[in-house]
Amino acid sequence: MVSKSNISFIACVITAVFVLLLMGLVSIYNTPDTSLPLMTGTEYELLGLVKLGLTLIVVCGACFLTFLTLIVHLRLIRN
Amino acid sequence: MSAKMIERFSEAQIGTHTVCAFSIMILYITGISLIFPKELGWIPELIGLSKMMYIHRIAGIALVASAVYYAIYFVLYLAFIDFSPLKNVLPGLHDGKAAVKDIFYAIHIGKQPEGYRKYNWLEKVDIFSVAIFDALIMGITGIVIWIPWFFTSILPKSIILSLKFVHGSFAILSLAGILLHFYVVHLTPARFPVDKTMFTGYMDAHEVQHEYTQWYDEVIEGDSK
């Protein structure tokens, strides 16, 4: 019979293996190499576009969250 | 189930939430100061940049690990114990309808909506935003910018460099989402200063009946069988 505690134990073991693998990967490759190649002009422009896109996502997300907060607040007032 | 309390969260959920909550707070403190060095530069100065980044990475691993643990736990639970919780968790058309009804009710058009199922639409937005943005996107981008030299053979350098901005931007968005979560569970008058349900796992039956009517009916129906 599979119980909740058995499932929790199995999930814990798999998570521990995952974390150990991740830490192992990081420690093996944890040699800072600052010699990342420089970007070309096109890549630099693309990075600017990415930044613009991300700014738009953050602004839209923040507006959506503000709207949700407002709805929660107004609903609270009506209740 | 006792006479006045109904079990809402399992021990696995409480544990996962606790780890997530602490790790996210640490991630904000140690991470946001890097995005705004002029305003929050005193934080790395106080802790020390290398120590701060070490703490940031440990907290990041804790957050991703808690998400991985709960995902595995939930899949195993569905497979071996009970499949029914899936319908409470997955967003559906009923959530969209409930959201529209709530919005209309909030702006004084329409009647008071009937109570929710076990988790309402706002709670689903909350939890899925944490799972997708905080654990998945922030986790993956965090690992890439942690060891970029490992990924230079797989990803173009422009993508690796842009992931740093993706990580920072979603961190700000995540912080905005957590503020909404704080408002709902800490500053709502009925729950101020803290909603204890997430820590005890139990919710007052009257609150369930009032707020989560459909779930309350299911629980009562289940008990009477």
Image (cartoon, coloured by chain):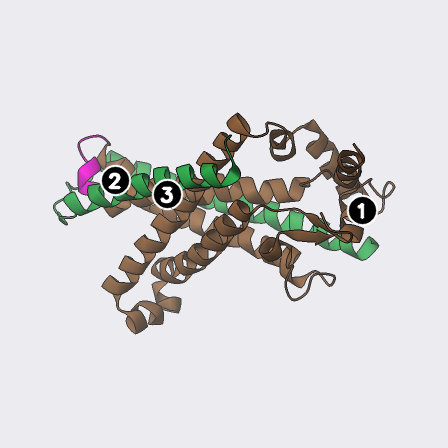
Horizontal side of residue B138 vs B80, given as left or right: left
Q: What residue do we see at 72% from left, 30% from top?
A: B94
Q: Are marks 3 and 1 in contact (CB under 8 Å)?
A: no
The residue beneath circle 2 is A21
- Depth check: B108 or B92 in front? B92
Circle 3 packing at 10 Å, graded few (<14), some (14-19), many (20+), is: some
Q: Are marks 3 and 1 on the same chain?
A: yes
| Residue B8 at x, y percent in the picture | 65, 46
The residue that label 3 is drawn on is B139
Looking at the image, the residue that sits furthest to the front is A1
Q: Residue at x 36, y 61 (%)?
A: B30
Instruction: Determine whether the residue tagged by mark 2 lies in a helix, strand or loop.
Output: helix
Q: Give coordinates of residue B9: x percent, y percent.
A: 61, 47
Q: Chain of mark 2?
A: A
Give whichever of discs 3 and 1 has the lower sequence position: 3
Chain coloured brown: B
The CA span between labels 1 and 2 is: 46 Å
Q: Chain of mark 3?
A: B
Q: Amino acid at mark 2?
A: Leu
Q: Position of residue A18 (x, y in %)?
A: 31, 39
Pointer 1 residue: B209
